[in-house]
Image: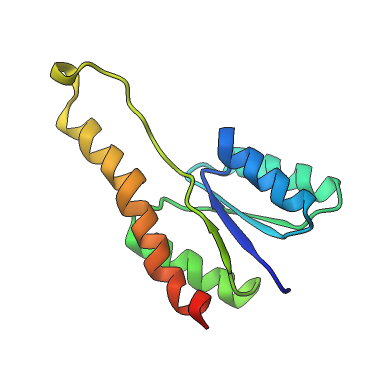
Amino acid sequence: MERLALVTGAGRGIGRAIAIRLSEAKIPVVLVARSDGEITALRNEIVAKGGIAYACPCDITQVTEVEALVSDIAAEVGQVNILINNAGVAPSAKLEDTTDEMWRETFAVNVDGAFHLMRALLPQMKG
């Protein structure tokens, strides 16, 4: 497999659209999201249209899950060389109504999650 893309937040919205476009360009895609249902449905849709896709549920805020994901993909599918760090959350609240939990979750997904994936995939992407 020459190219392999990993798309986070692939279950809906922009991530879903990116995954579909990559598959239309004949690039196999690893679909990543916290929930399995949406990425499994998208995988089935892509495969039905002749594409190659893998549904891999993962909470990217958890380092151990990211490391296991990257290890499993390398062993079972191949080397990821395209990373689309699309997963993100955007809670909507007035500043005075924003809780510490909302703030931490935003950073955990939007910043830490992207970092975890880049750090875990960098060795194989450099190679």
User: x, y (%) of residue 49?
Assistant: 85, 46
Point 66% across, 71% down: residue:
77
What count of labels does the image hold?
0
Q: Nearer the viewer, residue 112 or 35?
A: 112
Query: The N terminus lies in which quarter of the figure?
Result: bottom right
The answer to which image quadrant residue 10 occupies is: top right
Specify whether 95 is left or right of 6: left
Q: Position of residue 89 (x, y in %)?
A: 38, 35
- Residue drawn at x 50%, y 73% as measured from the top left: 71
Residue 7 vertical position relative to residue 9 in the rendered view, above or below: below
Q: Is residue 10 left or right of residue 110?
A: right
Q: Is residue 106 above or below residue 64?
A: above
The answer to whether residue 12 shows anywhere in this view is no
Q: Quadrant of residue 75?
A: bottom right
Query: Which sits in the foreground, 21 or 89?
Result: 21
Q: Residue 97, percent across and down?
A: 17, 17
Furthest-bottom residue in view? 127
Render colour scheme: rainbow
Compared to residue 77, the image places residue 97 above or below, namely above
Residue 103: x and y in percent read: 22, 34
* Residue sitting at x 35%, y 44%: 110
Decide if residue 7 is in sight here. Answer: yes
Give the residue at x 79% y 49%.
24
